């Protein structure tokens, strides 16, 4: 099946366009693309952070738009680990939104097939990020935090995962620039970034290396 024309998709009433089951069917069958959750500037910041990475962890997958972008830039020797509990993340999405594991897996599988032998290996973790972190031991070049958008949830993702990031590698926060002039974001991730990287009590050993729209990229320096 081919993607329905954008002009036709725009005619669909909002209540149908946001219906979780209908969206899952349409995304899974390839009739509509995954909903884009990131601006062009956000995507550029993420992909620049991931350039040359060998292992990337994405927390919060939804319909897979950013995961598809990562699939398009990571090399064949890279691993992309996707973490999402699919249904147990009440603060990760706007009210009434949701995603279905079946549909997102199918969407990502198409992206992998398009790249063929050049695609990274994709590893699914259908669980809460803290549960995956409890079993994790490998170094990670990039951690992309875009899951539970409450302050407590974002703080938990940071505290669980930043210890796996070696010197010179990065953590990327989405929706974390609500306090910046011209920036956007949500209160939870914005507060976490402000506390750890912008305040007098900022975490030592880390620095902000890039910002764009709703995205903040930090790097471990020691």
Image (cartoon, rainbow, N blue to C red):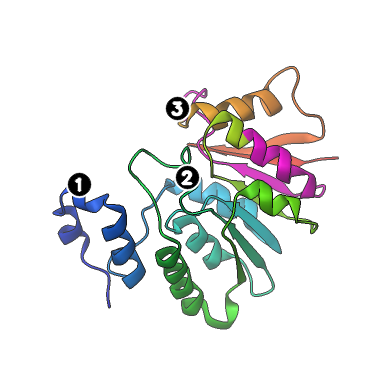
In the rendered image, which quarter contains the N terminus? bottom left
Residue 16 or residue 184, whichever sits in front: 16
Mark carried by residue 182: 3
Few, some or many C-alpha atoms within 10 Å of disc 1 (few <14, some 14-19, many ≥20)? few
Mark 1–mark 2 distance (CA, rounded to whole Å): 26 Å
Percent from the top left, x then y, of residue 17?
23, 52
Highlighted range, magenta: 155-183
Q: Nearer the viewer, mark 3 or mark 1?
A: 1
Percent from the top left, x then y, of residue 98?
38, 50
Confirm or deny contact between disc 3 and disc 2 (CB under 8 A). Answer: no
* Residue occupied by mark 1: 14
Q: Among all residues in the image, which is located at the extreme right?
A: 222
* Residue occupied by mark 2: 41
Dot 1 lies on which element?
helix
In the rendered image, which quarter contains the C terminus? top right
Percent from the top left, x then y, of residue 109?
48, 73
State which tag comes first along the sequence, 1 or 2: 1
> Which residue lies at the image location 39% right of the left edge and 52% below the top edge?
36
State which tag comes first along the sequence, 3 or 1: 1
Q: Is residue 102 above or below residue 210?
A: below
> Does the magenta portion include 186?
no
Residue 105 or residue 85, whichever sits in front: 85
Dot 2 lies on which element?
helix
Q: Is residue 195 at least partly visible in the picture?
A: yes
């Amino acid at each position: 099946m081919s993607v329905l024309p954008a002009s036709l998709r725009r005619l669909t009433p909002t209540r149908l366009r946001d219906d979780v089951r209908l969206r899952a069917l349409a995304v899974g069958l390839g009739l509509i693309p995954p909903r884009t959750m990131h601006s062009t500037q956000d995507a550029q910041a993420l992909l620049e952070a991931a350039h040359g990475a060998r292992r990337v962890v994405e927390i919060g997958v939804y319909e897979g738009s950013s995961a598809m972008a990562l699939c398009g830039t990571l090399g064949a020797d890279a691993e992309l680990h996707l973490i999402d509990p699919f249904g147990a993340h009440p603060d990760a999405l706007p009210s009434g939104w949701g995603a279905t594991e079946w549909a997102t897996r199918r969407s990502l599988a198409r992206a992998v097939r398009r790249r063929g032998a050049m695609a990274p290996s994709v590893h699914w973790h259908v669980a809460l990020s803290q549960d995956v972190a409890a079993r994790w031991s490998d170094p990670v070049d990039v951690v992309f935090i875009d899951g539970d958008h409450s302050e407590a949830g974002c703080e938990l993702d940071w505290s669980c995962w930043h210890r796996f990031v070696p010197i010179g590698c990065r953590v990327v926060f989405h929706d974390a620039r609500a306090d910046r002039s011209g920036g956007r974001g949500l209160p939870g991730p914005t507060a976490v970034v402000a506390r750890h990287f912008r305040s007098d009590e900022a975490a030592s050993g880390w620095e902000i290396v890039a910002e764009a729209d709703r995205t903040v990229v930090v790097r471990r320096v020691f």
